[in-house]
């Protein structure tokens, strides 16, 4: 049975049980315990400038019976979600990503996006190895590194330089609570996490470059 369920405008990533999750998601940010991560597809019409987005999302989650879920918002067609599972030694990493670059930025600079369509890159990663909070933070750094590397590889050029992400990216990382202290690039955990995220984001970014960018559509 797949861990992913597509029910447009939602995608649900079933973590397989309660796990520690670290994110800066709109719903349940920071360190929390959750058993699922959700994406909610939105369009500009869903989020007018005067809307209280947090209240709107709370209502949407209540209607779905999902206020417990760490929840991400994306304007990418949710059907373009990509996932990748990588096993290295005793660690399996499952990355899920939606990738849109319509509000891309080159780190250290800002482009005026007033009146434009906004995209985002949302990544969730599940690690099956029990980790300490410190190790989970280290995994977060690898996820961001992998995402950025994938975006750089598609060579989306802006007036300020090559795109490295978007202004509204979000990452959520999940793992069982445990004692593992390290999850860097020299570890099985870091290798599996990095490759899974890199692959999922790269596939989504290439699709955006080939289709949405070409068609000048929303991402």
Image (spheres, grey):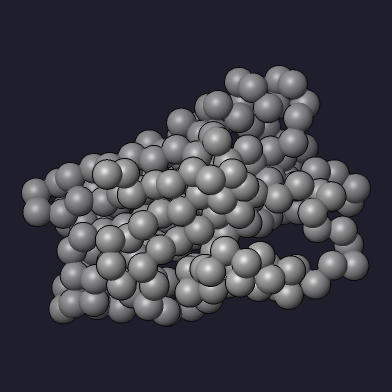
Q: Residue at x 42, y 79 (%)?
A: 31
Q: In this view of the protein, which residue sits in the foreground, 155 or 84? A: 84
Q: Is residue 106 something one can see in this rendering?
A: no
Q: On screen, 138 above or below 87?
A: below
Q: Is residue 110 above or below residue 218?
A: below
**Residue 51 point in image, percent of width and height:** 84, 67
| Quadrant of the frame with the N terminus | top left
How many labels sit on residues?
0
The residue lying at 80 percent from left, 43 percent from top is 117
Viewer-proximal residue among 150 and 36: 36
The answer to which quarter of the image holds residue 79 is: top right
The image shows residue 31, relative to residue 158, as above or below, that is below
Relative image position of residue 124 (x, y in whole percent): 43, 55
Place of residue 26 in the rendered image (x, y in percent of width and height, measured from the top left): 61, 69
**Relative side of 118 to 195, left or right:** right
- Please tell me which residue is depicted at 55% across the width and 54% down the height of the picture: 39
Q: Quadrant of the C terminus?
A: top right
Can residue 37 be seen here? The reply is yes
Q: Is residue 219 above or below residue 52?
A: above
Residue located 24% across and 71% down the image: 176
Residue 28 on image: x %, y %: 53, 76
Question: Would residue 9 appear left or right of 91 to someone viewing this image?
Answer: right
Q: Nearer the viewer, residue 138 or 84?
A: 84
Residue 210 image-quadrant placement: top right
């Amino acid at each position: 049975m797949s861990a992913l369920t597509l029910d447009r405008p939602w995608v649900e990533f079933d973590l397989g049980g309660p796990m520690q999750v670290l994110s800066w998601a709109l719903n349940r940010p920071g360190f929390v315990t959750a058993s699922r991560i959700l994406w909610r597809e939105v369009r500009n019409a869903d989020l007018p400038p005067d809307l209280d987005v947090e209240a709107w999302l709370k209502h949407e989650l209540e209607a779905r019976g999902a206020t417990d879920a760490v929840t991400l918002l994306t304007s990418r067609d949710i059907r373009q979600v990509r996932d990748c599972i990588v096993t290295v030694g005793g660690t399996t990493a499952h990355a899920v990503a939606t990738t849109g670059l319509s509000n891309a930025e080159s780190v250290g600079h800002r482009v005026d996006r007033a009146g434009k369509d906004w995209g985002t890159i949302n990544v969730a990663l599940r690690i099956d190895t029990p980790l300490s909070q410190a190790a989970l933070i280290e995994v977060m750094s690898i996820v961001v590194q992998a995402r950025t590397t994938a975006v750089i590889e598609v060579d989306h050029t802006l007036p300020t330089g090559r795109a490295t992400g978007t202004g509204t990216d979000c990452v959520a990382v999940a793992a069982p609570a445990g004692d593992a202290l390290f999850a860097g690039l020299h570890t099985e955990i870091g290798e599996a996490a990095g490759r899974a995220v890199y692959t999922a984001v790269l596939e989504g970014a290439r699709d955006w470059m080939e289709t949405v960018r070409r068609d000048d559509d929303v991402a």
